[in-house]
Amino acid sequence: MSDIEFEAEEEVDPRVLGLYGDINEENSQEFIAALLHYYHLPDEEPDENGLIPIHPIDFYISTGGGLVAEMFAIYDIMRMTRDKCPIHTCGIGKVMSAGVLLLASGTKGERRIGKHCRIMLHRVLTGDSGSLHNIQATYKEAEIMEEMMFKALASETNLTVARLKKIVSKNLDAFFSAEEAVEMGSADIIV
């Protein structure tokens, strides 16, 4: 046996969150609950310089997309939370559709993307059945949500609403590499 003794360092809450798979009501509720938990943790005692240590949240995302309303629920909580606590996003595998806004809404300079991660943008999808009036109402709501998504993406990236509309104008999925994601401003660093 060795005579060397190791002192265990004080355990630090790592604040690591992941969002994997489709963005739906269940996993968005779980993610929001975890994010709010970290947001409402009491501040630590000031250090010797009088500064309160801030522990960022590391948010890993790999998704094929999902519900736009749930994306906006997460996005609004992320915007509120990142003012007090930095959010370091990291896209891995694939970040598609609704996931692109979540990747882009991390703290600027701290948004990472895996070298082999692919991102994808497309128009808001909708599907409804029933009366013609219900279908028209759903279509109108999809147009509103799409415009909201373009404005939010434009505010978080280097893209304009006009550029985003041009990307999706052919009604096809538009895929991008990690390098292109950095150029577009959806991420800052390739890992």
Image: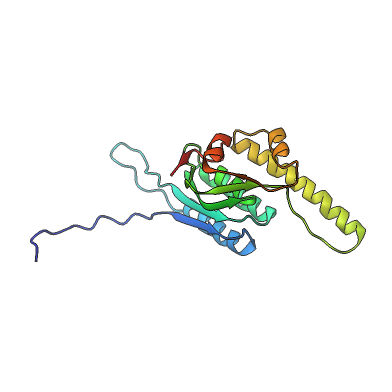
How many numbered marks have been drawn onto this rendered protein structure?
0
Q: Is residue 11 visible?
A: yes
* Quarter of the image where one finds residue 174: top right
Residue 105 appears in the rendering: no
Name the residue nearer the viewer: 145 or 66. 66
- The residue positioned 79% from the left and 59% from the top of the image is 127
Residue at the extreme right of the image, as rendered: 132
Q: Nearest the camera: 121 or 43? A: 121
Quarter holding the N terminus?
bottom left
- Residue under the image location 83 percent in, 52 percent down: 139
Question: Which residue is located at x 75 percent, y 41 percent?
Answer: 169
Say left or right for 114 vs 64. Answer: left
> Between residues 21 and 87, which one lies in front from this camera angle?
21
Q: x, y percentage for residue 25?
A: 64, 62
| Residue 7 coordinates in the image, percent (x, y) | 19, 57
Quadrant in which the C terminus is drawn: top left
Q: Position of residue 8 (x, y in %)?
A: 23, 58
Residue at left offset 41%, top offset 48% = 43
- Chosen colour scheme: rainbow
Q: Nearer the viewer, residue 123 or 67?
A: 123
Which corner quadrant of the image does residue 14 belong to? bottom left
Q: Is residue 47 above or below residue 10?
A: above
In screen coordinates, is 123 left or right of 89? right
